[in-house]
Image (tube, grey):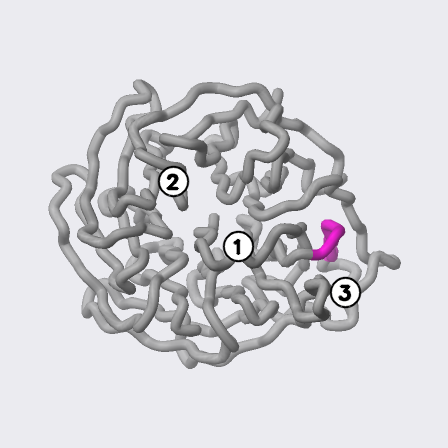
Amino acid sequence: MRAWGPALAQARTATVLLAVVLAAGCGAPDAAARTCAAPVRCVPLGRNATAVVFSPDGSRFAVGGIGTLRVFDTASGTLVADMPVREFEPVTELVFSPDGTRVATPVEGGARLWDAATGLPAGTLTGHVRVPLDLAYSPDGAWLAGAGSTGVVRIWQVSTGRTFRVLPTGTGRVDAVTFSPDRRTVAAAGGDGAVRIWQVATGALVSTLQGHTGAVRELSYAPLGGLLASGGEDGTVRVWNLATKAGSVLSGHDGAVHEVVFCPDGHTVASGGVDGTVRIWQVKDAAQRTMPESEARDADGRMSAVIGIAISPDGTTLAVADGGRHLRLWHIESLT
């Protein structure tokens, strides 16, 4: 799931979802498939959208936006659940629980849990001073972490709703938070450009990774651990080797990077930014493929920023919130 920075929030008032099927393991997209004509299937969203995430098994995807939160069936595009979000409440982040039964969204003071099948509220976790800027479930679903605009990471024990741990970052704002695949550590980053990693059990700070020259907006662990990707306002994606603390720099975006996600193969990274493009990087040699520019444009004709990215668990589908007005689905079997 993805951090929605203040600058981007002010610049984007109308956003929506675009989904693109890639070759196996996050390969190259089909640049020619840019309309809703066959073989592309479009799913109308109805409201502006700012975030997207696939369920752990890939059978569903959730879309959040201004006053909307919906769950769709991936195969058919039919609506599964429509959550009763308040009319102008911005759903800027969302995350599925590992068992696929809940969707968590940030709200004033904490996080709200929703039943992914019925769309009904399923509890609220409190303790943050303001609305969290990012949320992350631990891989086993026991904990939910919230990145705070006041500089702390709060970890809740989901079964009780109580705060398990509060981690002070020493920075004024935390934009991104994520658990390691083994759930032993949690990483967070924000306004000062440093990536900090703590042991969840003890709360001890174990690493501080520095290299970005601006705020860090998003983090993503490689599926097997060992590598951590970060995207920043300095326009770079960095992939950190957690054993050596060294970071490789992936450059190519024209402007801030607000979305980064590891592909399931662990060898490629997808990123999106304010330049309206999504880039697919090979970690080993920094080779990149650039998807077609965003189809959405501002009133003055400029490309809209990429706000959210999600990759299906099988690595064949990349979903991008970019300010367009359709959900587009490309099926790998139909690509030539």
Q: Nearer the viewer, mark 1 or mark 3?
A: 1
Measuring 40% from the left and 65% from the top, which residue is drawn there? 231
Q: Of the residues tagged 2 and 1, which is closer to the observer? A: 1
Magenta stretch secondary structure, dominant:
loop
State whether residue 318 is above or below residue 49.
below
Residue type at tag 2: Pro
Q: Name the residue under label 2.
A: 132
For the residues marked 2 and 1, what is the alpha-carbon distance in whole angstroms? 17 Å
Element type where label 1 sits in the image: helix
> Which contiguous range is marked in magenta?
324-331
The residue identified by callout 3 is: 335
Q: In this view, does 116 lie to the left or right of 20?
A: left
Mark 2 or 3, which is nearer the eye? 2
Q: Does the magenta stretch include residue 329?
A: yes
Q: Where is residue 190 in the image (x, y as percent from the top left)?
A: 32, 56
Q: Earlier in the sequence, mark 2 or mark 1?
A: 1
